[in-house]
Amino acid sequence: MRIVRLYSGSDGKSHFEDIDFPTGPDGLMVRQTLLPVKAPMLAEFFEANNRWQNAPRRQYVVSLRGQKEIEAGDGTKRLFVPGDILLAEDLNSTGHIVRTVGPRGTSAMLSLPLAD
């Protein structure tokens, strides 16, 4: 299973990295490979914000509904659809931009903050 990591690079910009997590014979991700998380939070995106922002904390972000385009500080853009998982760790960089793709109010993500 692939997870996309968004992290702060030594150049002061955010970057994407693809991480392949092992799966078991049933095709499900092996739990021991994931970092422990706190209580989940639902985030609804009603419109594109087009502003640079950093991740508020280290967290997994799971796309639930709609499509989102995320632009990293290095200019790379990725499209996220339901089922995609992002590991957001760009706490100390130029940050990223999240844009909704499609009609207003059609995008939702689940945030899973990492445990300290």
Image: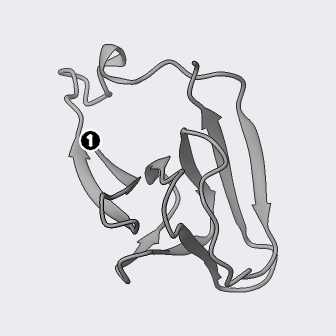
Q: What is the secondary structure assignment of the residue under circle 1?
A: loop
- Give x and y (percent) for residue 113: 62, 33
Is residue 63 shown left or right of residue 40? left
Looking at the rendered structure, the kind of residue marked 1 is Met
Q: How is the image coloured?
A: one colour
Is residue 46 shown left or right of residue 39? right
Is residue 108 shown left or right of residue 18? right
Query: Which image quarter: residue 29?
Result: top left
Residue at x 57%, y 18% (from the top left corner)? 116
- Give x and y (percent) for residue 41: 75, 39
In the depicted view, which residue is nearer to us: 92 or 96?
A: 92
- Give x and y (percent) for residue 47: 78, 80
Task: Give the vertical position of 102 relative to 55 (above or below).
Answer: below
Residue at x 54%, y 39% (from the top left corner)? 58
Residue at x 55%, y 47% (from the top left corner)? 62
Query: Which image quarter: residue 84?
Result: bottom left
The residue to which callout 1 is attached is 1
- Give x and y (percent) for residue 91: 54, 50
The outermost residue toward the top is 32
Task: Give the vertical position of 14 relative to 100 (above or below).
Answer: above
Mark 1, residues whose alpha carbon is within 10 Å: few (<14), some, or many (≥20)?
few
In the depicted view, which residue is nearer to us: 83 or 115?
A: 115
Query: Which image quarter: residue 100?
Result: bottom right
In the depicted view, which residue is nearer to us: 54 or 17?
A: 54
Residue at x 24%, y 34% (from the top left corner)? 21
Q: How many marks?
A: 1
